[in-house]
Image (cartoon, rainbow, N blue to C red):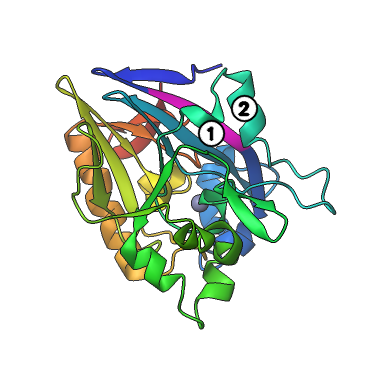
Amino acid sequence: MAKNVVRVGNVEIMALSDGSLEFDLCNFFPTIPEDNWQPYEAHLHDHRVRFNLGSYLIRSDGKTVLVDTGLGPKPADTPDAPWGQLLRDFETKGVRLDEVDMVVMTHLHRDHVGWNLMPQGTKYVPTFPKARYWMSRTDWETSHQPDVQPMRFPNAPTCVWPLEELGLIEFMGPEQHITRDLTAVPTPGHTPGHMSILITSGGERALVLGDAAHNPVQLQEPDWVSRADMDPDLTRQTRKALIERLEREQILVAAGHFEAPGFGRIVTLEGRRYWRGL
Ligand SMILES: [Zn+2]
């Protein structure tokens, strides 16, 4: 199994997972004719696309930063759901929830905010009791638009909005340094305020991708947008520019929805781009 911890200069990145999700191909990529997938069968599981629900725990400059918090506890009526495992993964890997100083959300879709809070009676308490919660103001505002919220940010009312009353929110802007080694890089399209997180330390770099890509196929087919991409044109534009940069500068990538642990680099072989897992 690929190892779940990498070092980038003085920074340690540990891959954690809330489990996985699967969707029928035609459901998740409704605009891509099925036949176009033929060369990429190896990326599919029985006509389905599988997503790891990856989070990354970054130890940087004396701070412990958790990027994304999975889909959250499984509902009582789906005890067999293959997700809802993030807290167990913390335990397995020997990380305490109160070690987390900062929770950083790449965006506010439901599979990135699920474990932010725990219900307690009629109130909510932070799952990571010492953390402040970082997000883009643009996604925060978009998650409050009544015509957008129910479809695009279904669990924001229980997993994101209560953070305001708890006084735990920090907004991050484009290119903002959130620690000495971490920078929020705007990668809009999938959501309007989507951010990837750049790690720079000791002359080395890595990028926590967020949902700028969901599947390695999109490195070869950057125009393939999914139904989860809110602005298809901007998604394509952002993805192409990002892929080019990541390859040109050989930046290590941490891709939360690729096969766990999701660490790898983008390379070109015989004129085609590929994902090379670590
Ligand atoms: Zn996602």
Residue at image point 63% right, 20% down: 92
Where residue 147 sits: x, y (%)?
Answer: 51, 83
- The residue singled out by tag 2 in the image is 89
Q: In the image, what residue occupies the spot 47% across and 48% down? A: 214
Type of amino acid under label 2 = Asp
State the mark number for residue 201: none
Examine the rendering and report whether any part of residue 234 can be seen.
yes
Residue 18 versus residue 65: which sits nearer the camera?
Answer: 65
Dot 1 and dot 2 residues touching (CB under 8 Å): no
User: Where, quadrant-wise, is the C terminus in this rendering?
Assistant: top left
Q: Nearer the viewer, mark 1 or mark 2?
A: 2
Q: Which one is in front, 218 or 4?
A: 4
What kind of secondary structure does the magenta stretch mostly adopt? Answer: strand
Badge 1 is on which residue?
259
Label 2: how many Cα within 10 Å (few below 14, some 14–19, many 20+): some
Q: Secondary structure at mark 1?
A: loop
Reading the chain from its start, which is encountered first: label 1 or label 2? 2
Q: Is residue 120 left or right of residue 6?
A: right
Q: Residue at x 63, y 33 (%)?
A: 87
> Which kind of residue does numbered mark 1 sit on?
Glu
The boundaries of the magenta stretch are 13-18
157 and 189: which one is in front? 157
